[in-house]
Amino acid sequence: MGIIENERAQFMLLAGFIIAIGLVITTVMLNNIIFESNMAGEAGGDSIKYDVVNLMRISGDEIKSAYRNASGQNAPMKIINFTKQMQNFNGNLSQIYALHGEGVNLSLDISNWNSTRYANFTDNGTVNGAANWTVMENIINSNITINVTPILSSFNISISNSTSSWQINFTSPPGNRTINNSQIIANITPPYKISFINGANVSGRFNITGNASNNRPFTRARDYIINATIILSTSNMRANITIPVSVPW
Amino acid sequence: MLDEKGQMHTLEGVAAATIMLLVIVYAIDATSMTPLTSSTANVHVETELQVLGQDILGALDYTEPGFNSKLKNDILGWNGKEYTWNGIRYMEKGNASNPLTNNLTNYLNYTLVTQGIAHSVELTFLTNNGTSLLSQKMIYNGNPSDNAVIVSRKIALHNSENPNKNNFLLTDIDPSTNLYNIVDVKLILWRM
């Protein structure tokens, strides 16, 4: 009896083998597609936020520096010199940012300074800022000079430590007061913190200098709020941001 | 006459081609992806480096009112010389006895060096009253790869800080005001 040549089983085996291999390939490729889709491929595009933050920071610092520098000069020259320094800063900054293919422009609204409209005693100096806020913590000695003009509603400076507090109330004139370190330590044991309470409805200037717990000197001062409008533009985005900058610090 | 050999050969050919394709797919997946490979996946590595670099510069540039940031103090204290990492410290090029030790090198030492991330630091500032630009290398560790990441921070310097005390190439671009110069600090990072 001769051998029966039947190749159907071989066909079936081969077909099964091909299907199995095809499944493996499909799975590997599908896996690759899912992996690539989940990669943070576009996250690199967010780097512009660092440029915006840096631009806000360097512009704010320069405004403060130019104001402090101009403050020491006679009255008519103050704003002229301030404006000149900021214009030069703006022009030079544009060249630095052009290195990275970015365009910048800085414009300032100094109407508050021009009109002697002092800042509110809020955290950011604007009427909408937080009315109750801590100016400085962990102070061991300080001197406070404050000028509230005018006193339209009750305003408090709260100096407190972990166990007690001393309230300096501004409900009636004089709004111009100096609280020295001797007065403070007679009422509060260091280290203490200085907070402003109900600062939204009153405006004026303050200057607080002293030393923190680590003997590090500090200065917190504010006369005006200068509104800075910063424009940063690249090939695919444009940011237009207005920030309130507290001067001199 | 029923002859299935041709059909069988065709099927065997398809099977062989499929196996070859599988081998190629596997080989590509296994060997081609390195940190320096340009691909979609490399963007992930670049993003990590970018975030790390920005965090380093951001931490160095933080300061409270009335004080210079650590980064600014490092720029003011730098002598304009080029330094290279020798495996232990950043040493001056051509003068192995003069190391660079400042806030920036401390941060780089604790972050990039420990992770084996190659890096250079370059400063660009304005010269000739702000009409041209000049770049100086503070730290140079070779030419970066094609996939290097650059992060930068701009620092404004003022006359009162005496910026050219140590680096005479830093010139006053605005003698009429307190603004002295604007420095672009570039940190270049790449995987080896």
Image (cartoon, coloured by chain):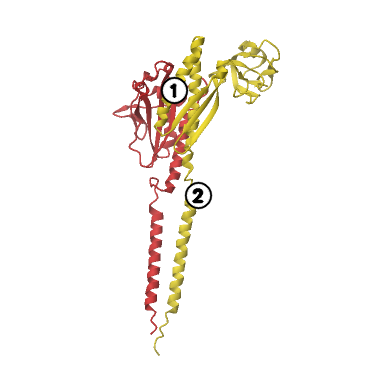
Chain colours: A yellow, B red
Q: Position of residue A25 (x, y in %)?
A: 45, 62
Q: Position of residue B38 (x, y in %)?
A: 39, 47
Task: Name the residue nearer the viewer: A141 or A83.
Answer: A83
A10 w.r.t. A241: above or below: below
Q: Which numbered tag is attached to residue A38? A: 2
| Residue, disc 1 | A89
Q: Which numbered tag is attached to residue A102? A: none
**Residue drawn at 34 percent across, 20 percent down:** B168
Look at the image and tell me in which quarter the C terminus of chain B lies.
Answer: top left
B28 w.r.t. A155: above or below: below
User: Residue B135: in sight, yes or no?
Assistant: yes
B7 w.r.t. B158: above or below: below
**Upstream in the sequence, badge 1 or badge 2?**
2
Q: Nearer the viewer, mark 1 or mark 2?
A: 1
Distance from the alpha carbon under mark 1 to that under mark 2: 43 Å
Q: Residues within 10 Å of mark 1 (few under 14, many from 20)?
A: many
Q: Quadrant of residue B26?
A: bottom left
Task: Name the residue nearer the viewer: B166 or B168.
Answer: B168
Look at the image and tell me in which quarter the N terminus of chain B lies.
Answer: bottom left
Q: Residues within 10 Å of mark 2 (few under 14, many from 20)?
A: few
- The kind of residue on which mark 1 rests is Phe
Q: Quadrant of residue A170?
A: top right
Q: Position of residue B154 (x, y in %)?
A: 44, 28
In the image, taking residue B95 as reference, residue A72 lies left or right, namely: right
**Residue drawn at 40 percent across, 69 percent down:** B15
Q: Secondary structure at mark 1?
A: helix
Q: Chain of mark 2?
A: A
